[in-house]
Amino acid sequence: MTSRYLFFCLLFLTTASFAQIANDNTLKAQIDGKEFTTQPRRIKIGTFWWITANTVKPDKSLRIWLGRFDKNDVLEPGTYLVVDADKPDTKENKKKYEDMGKYKGIAVIKYVEETREPRMEYHVGKSKNADETIQVKMGSDGFLEATFASTLEGSYWKEKASATVFGGMGRLMNKVQDKAITKASGYDSDIDPEGNGYKKQEKVDQIVITNGTFRLKLN
């Protein structure tokens, strides 16, 4: 009884503590033929600044990083070469980047979708080396505008039985709290399955993103 009471108190306080942060940014895309529309934000994850777009029911997160091989972030007009999300700095990519001389930088795309609640299973997509590009320009109204399309390498992740058992009510409460933060604030909260008690499954596929556009206010 006490655990259940604390659980609902935490859920209420978490939801009440975060107000939805509105902005004029937009992101639209077709992901596996389904419309994905939301307001993106630029947030720091680890050492990188990502353009991240999130929706709920189920939780979904689309992230785009624009930068260079020296791992510095870049937000300038130009053409960006989409590279492998896990191994971006290969010799082939660097040679292509340097020899062609037409790229402003490189781009990484990652997509995460919750396939079983509450965050028990995920479908994850990552960009790969396929000569894809993102076109970026600066609008007269001060918005950074981009168009993109990509075929991501898809994988499936399932929560480990040991994480479920030993995590118990505490792990469940943390996941519900993270979902509440994502819903209330628009910022994805701890949605990545990798390294968080999930096991990668054998099944692989592709996640196809088409007709992607975003507008992001820089100042």
Image: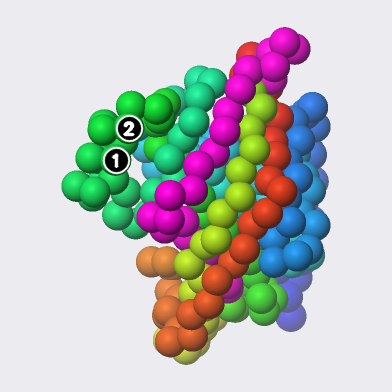
Secondary element at image label 1: helix
Secondary element at image label 2: helix
The part of the chain drawn in magenta is 122-143
Give the image location of residue 110, x and y in percent. Answer: 52, 54
Judge left or right: residue 129 versus residue 21.
left
In front of the other: 66 or 117: 66
Q: Is residue 125 visible?
A: yes
Residue type (three-letter) at the residue carrying disc 2: Met
Do callouts 1 and 2 mark residues in contact (Cβ within 8 Å)?
A: yes
Give the image location of residue 136, x and y in percent. Answer: 58, 28
**Residue placed under numbered mark 2 in the picture:** 100
- Identity of the residue drawn at 54% across and 38% down: 134
- Identity of the residue drawn at 40% across and 30% down: 103
Residue type (three-letter) at the residue carrying disc 1: Lys
Q: Is residue 157 above or below residue 149?
A: below
Give the image location of residue 83, x and y in percent. Answer: 39, 49
The residue sitting at the front extreme is 100
Q: Is residue 182 visible?
A: no
Label 2 crowding class (10 Å Cα cut-off): few <14, some 14-19, many 20+?
A: few
**Residue placed under numbered mark 1 in the picture:** 96
Q: CA distance from mark 1 to mark 2?
A: 6 Å
- Identity of the residue drawn at 79% across and 27% down: 24
**Quadrant in the rendering for residue 39:** top right
Q: Which mark is residue 57?
A: none
Give the image location of residue 3, x and y in percent. Answer: 67, 75
Q: Is residue 94 above or below residue 216?
A: below
Image quarter hosting the N terminus? bottom right
In front of the other: 76 or 173: 76
In front of the other: 13 or 118: 118
Label 1 crowding class (10 Å Cα cut-off): few <14, some 14-19, many 20+?
A: some
Image quarter hosting the C terminus? top right
